[in-house]
Image: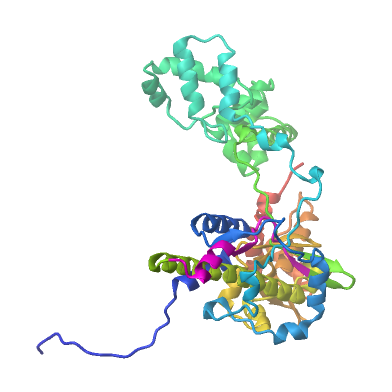
C-alpha cells in the first residue's frame, strides 16, 4: 500500500492553560515564605504594582479573631457565596474596585513591643565552625611550616561529622610532603577538641575517645578493636566467651561505649535551625474553633495611583499605553490570585477543623480517618486543588504545630464496625513499645494481638510497616541487657 502526504482540516477541543492560570496554580502551592519572595520580585519588576504602607492603609479591623469567629458561625452565607476554583480561571472577586482603591487584606500578627523582636545579638553574631575551632588549636601549637600546611589540609578535608574523608596519600601529594609526615600530624589533630575528631571510620573515632578516657587495655578497647560486629548485634555472651571475662563486664563496657559520641563534629555544625512558621492559626473561642490566616510579612498590594491617573488621562503614546496596560493586567491577576489563594487555604483549613474536631479536643487518639475527597466534596473543589493547598502548609492548633497533610490518613476497621485512623494506631503502637519491658521486648505479632484485644483489626505485617515508619527497631534491636 502506497503512503502519501496530504493536508486535512480537523476541529478539536483541548484545555489550554494560560500563563496567568499557571501562575495562579503555582501561587496556590507555594509556602508563605516562598510567596513573600514572589511578591517582592513582582514589586521590583512591575511598576504598576506597589505596596500599601501602614501610614497609607485605612482602618482594616484589627479584631481578626472576632471577624473569623463571626464567619465561622455564618455557614449559610459562606455556602451562598460563589467561589470558583483556581483551575477554572473565572472571576472570583465581587468587589474589584476595592483593589483599585488600594484594598489591604493583610491582617497578620505584628510586633507590638520591642521586647518581642529578635535581639541584635541573635542577628549579628556568627557561630564558630568546626574548621575555625580546629585551626585555632592548630596555630596555638608548636608546628613547623610544613606541619601547619599538612594540618590545614587535614582539617579542610573533615566532613560535618568530623571524619577525615581524604586518603593520606592524597593529602601528602597536595601538600608536597611524604606520607610519613601526614601520619605523624594526624594523631596530633586527633587529640584536639572535640575528642574523636579526624577519625577515618567509626571504630577509630570510638577508640580515640575511649583511650582519652583512660580505657587503653580495658575490655572496652578490646571490644572496639575485635568485636564491634558482635556489639552491634548485642551478642554479649559471645563477646564474654571470646574475651574470657564475665558477662557483667561486657554489659558495663557496652554501656560505656554507648555513651561515646559517634559524630563529634556535629556540635559545631554550621547548619542553622529552620523554624516553621504556621500558615493557619486555630484558636478555641468558647465552644467553637476559629481559623485565622497568618499574613505576617506578606505585603499589602494595590495598583499604582500615579500610573492609573496617567493612563486615564490619555497622555500616553501608543507604545507606552500598551506597556502600562500589560503591566496593569499582570498586577490585577497577581492580586486576584493571591486573594483567591488565601480564600482557598482558609476554606480548606476550616473544613479540616470541622472534620478533625475530636483531634483538637483530645489529641492523636481523636484523629479520624480523612481523605482528600472528603474535603473536596465538602467545599466543592477538586482533589488536586486540595492536594496543592495542603503541600508544605502548617497549622498551629491547640494540640501543637502540624502539617496539613498530617490530618489526612487511611482508616483501619474495628471489630465493632467503626474505623480508626492509621495515625492513631501508630501512636498506640508507640505507646505500647514505650511501656514494654526492655529486657523482653514485644514482637510485632504480640503487638497485633494486643491491638486486636482493643478491637483494632490489624495484621502483623501492618504493625511492622507502621513500626518502621516510626523508625523503631525490631524486638531484637530493642532488647536491652541492662
Q: Residue at x 83, y 69 (%)?
A: 66
Q: Is residue 236 visible?
A: yes
Return the residue nearer the eye: 147 or 247: 147
From the viewer's perspective, tell me whether residue 213 is left or right of residue 132. right
Quarter of image, res 467: bottom right
58 to 197, vertically: above or below:
below
Return the residue nearer the eye: 42 or 292: 42
Image spot of residue 205 (x, y percent):
58, 30
Image spot of residue 17 (x, y percent):
44, 76
Q: Residue at x 81, y 47 (%)?
A: 113
Image spot of residue 221 (x, y percent):
63, 26
Which quadrant of the rendered structure holds the N terminus? bottom left
Return the residue nearer the eye: 45 or 403: 45
Image spot of residue 307 (x, y percent):
53, 63
244 to 63, vertically: above or below:
above
Q: Residue at x 55, y 81 (%)?
A: 90
307 to 133, vertically: above or below:
below
Give the extent of the magenta segment: 291-316
Residue farthest toward the left in the current orientation of the protein? 2
Q: State yes or no: residue 472 in magenta.
A: no
Q: Is residue 240 visible?
A: no
From the viewer's perspective, tell me whether residue 83 is left or right of residue 71. left
Which quadrant of the rendered structure holds the C terminus? top right
Amino acid at each position: 500500500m502506497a503512503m502519501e502526504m496530504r493536508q486535512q482540516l480537523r476541529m478539536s477541543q483541548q484545555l489550554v492553560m494560560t500563563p496567568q492560570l499557571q501562575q495562579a496554580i503555582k501561587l496556590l502551592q507555594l509556602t508563605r515564605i516562598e510567596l513573600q519572595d514572589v511578591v517582592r520580585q513582582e514589586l521590583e519588576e512591575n511598576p504598576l504594582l506597589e505596596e500599601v504602607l501602614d501610614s497609607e492603609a485605612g482602618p482594616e479591623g484589627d479584631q481578626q479573631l472576632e471577624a473569623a469567629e463571626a464567619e465561622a458561625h455564618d455557614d449559610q452565607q459562606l455556602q451562598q457565596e460563589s467561589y470558583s476554583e483556581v483551575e477554572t480561571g473565572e472571576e472570583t472577586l465581587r468587589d474589584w474596585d476595592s483593589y483599585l482603591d488600594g484594598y489591604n487584606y493583610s491582617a497578620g500578627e505584628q510586633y507590638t513591643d520591642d521586647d518581642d523582636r529578635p535581639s541584635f545579638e541573635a542577628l549579628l553574631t556568627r557561630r564558630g565552625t568546626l574548621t575555625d575551632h580546629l585551626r585555632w588549636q592548630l596555630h596555638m601549637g608548636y608546628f613547623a611550616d610544613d606541619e601547619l600546611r599538612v594540618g590545614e589540609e587535614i582539617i579542610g578535608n573533615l566532613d560535618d561529622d568530623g571524619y577525615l574523608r581524604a586518603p593520606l596519600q592524597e593529602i601528602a601529594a597536595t601538600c608536597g610532603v611524604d606520607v610519613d609526615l601526614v601520619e605523624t600530624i594526624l594523631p596530633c589533630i586527633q587529640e584536639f577538641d572535640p575528642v574523636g575528631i579526624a577519625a577515618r571510620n567509626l571504630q577509630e573515632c570510638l577508640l580515640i575517645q575511649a583511650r582519652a578516657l583512660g580505657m587503653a587495655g580495658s575490655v572496652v578497647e578490646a571490644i572496639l578493636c575485635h568485636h564491634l560486629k558482635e556489639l552491634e548485634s548485642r551478642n554479649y555472651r559471645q563477646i564474654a566467651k571470646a574475651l574470657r571475662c564475665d558477662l557483667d563486664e561486657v554489659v558495663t563496657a557496652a554501656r560505656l561505649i554507648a555513651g561515646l559520641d559517634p559524630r563529634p563534629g556535629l556540635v559545631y555544625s554550621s547548619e542553622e535551625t529552620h523554624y516553621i512558621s504556621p500558615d493557619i492559626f486555630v484558636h478555641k473561642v468558647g465552644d467553637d474553633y476559629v481559623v485565622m490566616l497568618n499574613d505576617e510579612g506578606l505585603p499589602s498590594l494595590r495598583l499604582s495611583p500615579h500610573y492609573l491617573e496617567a493612563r486615564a488621562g490619555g497622555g500616553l503614546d501608543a507604545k507606552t499605553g500598551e506597556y502600562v496596560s500589560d503591566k496593569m493586567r499582570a498586577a490585577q491577576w497577581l492580586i486576584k490570585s493571591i486573594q483567591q489563594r488565601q480564600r482557598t487555604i482558609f476554606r480548606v483549613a476550616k473544613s479540616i477543623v470541622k472534620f478533625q474536631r475530636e483531634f483538637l479536643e483530645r489529641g492523636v487518639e481523636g484523629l479520624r480517618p480523612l481523605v482528600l475527597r472528603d474535603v473536596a466534596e465538602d467545599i466543592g473543589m477538586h482533589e488536586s486543588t486540595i492536594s496543592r493547598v495542603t503541600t508544605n502548609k502548617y497549622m498551629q492548633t491547640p494540640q501543637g504545630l502540624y502539617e496539613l497533610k498530617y490530618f489526612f490518613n487511611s482508616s483501619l476497621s474495628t471489630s465493632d464496625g467503626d474505623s480508626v485512623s492509621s495515625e492513631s494506631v501508630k501512636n498506640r503502637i508507640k505507646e505500647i513499645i514505650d511501656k514494654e519491658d526492655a529486657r523482653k521486648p514485644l514482637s510485632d505479632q504480640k503487638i497485633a494481638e494486643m491491638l486486636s484485644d482493643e478491637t483494632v483489626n490489624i495484621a502483623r505485617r501492618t504493625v511492622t510497616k507502621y513500626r518502621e515508619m516510626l523508625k523503631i527497631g525490631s524486638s531484637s534491636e530493642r532488647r536491652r541487657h541492662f
